[in-house]
Amino acid sequence: ILCGSLISMMQKHALSHDSPLYGRRSAQIRLKPLPFTDLYAVQGQPFSQAVEQYSVTGGVPKYLEFFEPGEDLYRQIQEVVLSKNGFLYEEPNFLLKDEVQSANSYFSIIRAIADGNHKLGKIAGALGMETSSLTPYLSTLIDLDFLKKATPVTEKNPEKSRKGLYFISDNFIRFWFRYVYPYKGELELDNQQIVLDELEKDFIQKFVAFSYEDICKDIFASLCRNKEVDFVPSRIGSYWLNDINGDTEIDVMAVDHQKKQVFAGECKYHNKPVDATVYYELEEKVKKSAELRTAFPGYKILYGLFSKSGFTQRMLDQAEGRDDILLIQEDRIL
């Protein structure tokens, strides 16, 4: 068994055509971070704490060693990530500099995406680069699992789609580029309070709520695997369309070609129960999308609402007796 964490080194010495071991391997595993549902099942901590911790660490076991369940998350971030002596303070530097030649160029690209630029043209514009020169850098970052390219689930050839958006795939890398990299000067002077103030201001609403959408995709996949939902997903992702009515976005969308079903879900990570208004808006988005009707003619639509804080009585009444509405509180179907 040959094991290594440097992807480029493993490819060069074990997998590539020029490697001395080429043709001799009997199998290979590209080990991925652990899914949220697997961690939540064994951690024994409240759902909201598990989500907030996962939004920082992702499913990397080594990172999780430094975050104790039940302890104050901000204090642990301060010690492990914001402190110059913290184990994770320089982590992206170590990861990237071992893998690529000019780490600064890659850092600039990841920072541009962390700032909210997800379209190829917008990333190039933020960096003052041509899109043709940017593409090889993005391909490398995708190969290294730093980035992922997402396309709407309606796309039949995702690899050729012009609607692709680029996202940081690793939760910790995304956290670091949002809350550490822009404040490196202050942190070098031991001014951690500036980042703690930023965390207090928008960590839950803007950062955790975004991570929660990916967690909801994992929860839905788990419900399907466990046969709690009669759905066999071919793809689980999101949907977006820049149309004349504004930007139509659906947080979680999955397609079941076997049973001709489409699942459309909205994720709400806040402290109040989700009301029926959210369902009405989701239903309206689906009904108004000509693209969805064209892509999946005759498919049954299932609606799902994901909530950490439950649902109003009005929403519960709306869903009662209907098999096309799923209410998912935390990781369970009500």
Image (spheres, grey):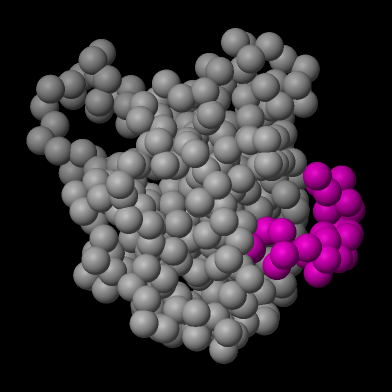
The image position of residue 109, as x and y in percent, is: 67, 29
Q: Residue at x 55, y 68 (%)?
A: 279
Q: Which residue is the extreme one toward the bottom? A: 313
Q: For residue 72, which quarter of the picture? A: bottom right
Can residue 222 be seen?
yes
Q: For residue 166, which quarter of the picture? A: top right
Up the image or down, 170 lies above or below 327; here it is: above
Quadrant containing the N terminus is top left
Residue 166 sits inside the magenta stretch? no
- In the picture, measured across the screen, residue 23 lies left or right of residue 110, that is left
Q: For residue 209, which quarter of the picture? A: bottom right
**Residue 227 or 286: which is nearer the viewer?**
286
Residue 208 sits inside the magenta stretch? yes
Quadrant containing the C terminus is bottom left
- In the picture, measured across the screen, residue 11 lies left or right of residue 197, that is left
> Overall secondary structure of the magenta stretch?
helix
- In the picture, measured across the screen, residue 33 lies left or right of residue 28, that is right
Q: Residue at x 32, y 55 (%)?
A: 300
Can residue 332 be seen?
no
Q: Residue at x 67, y 80 (%)?
A: 271
Q: Look at the image and give the residue range highlighted in magenta.
A: 182-209
Q: Residue at x 37, y 68 (%)?
A: 324
**Residue 10 or 166: which is nearer the viewer?**
166
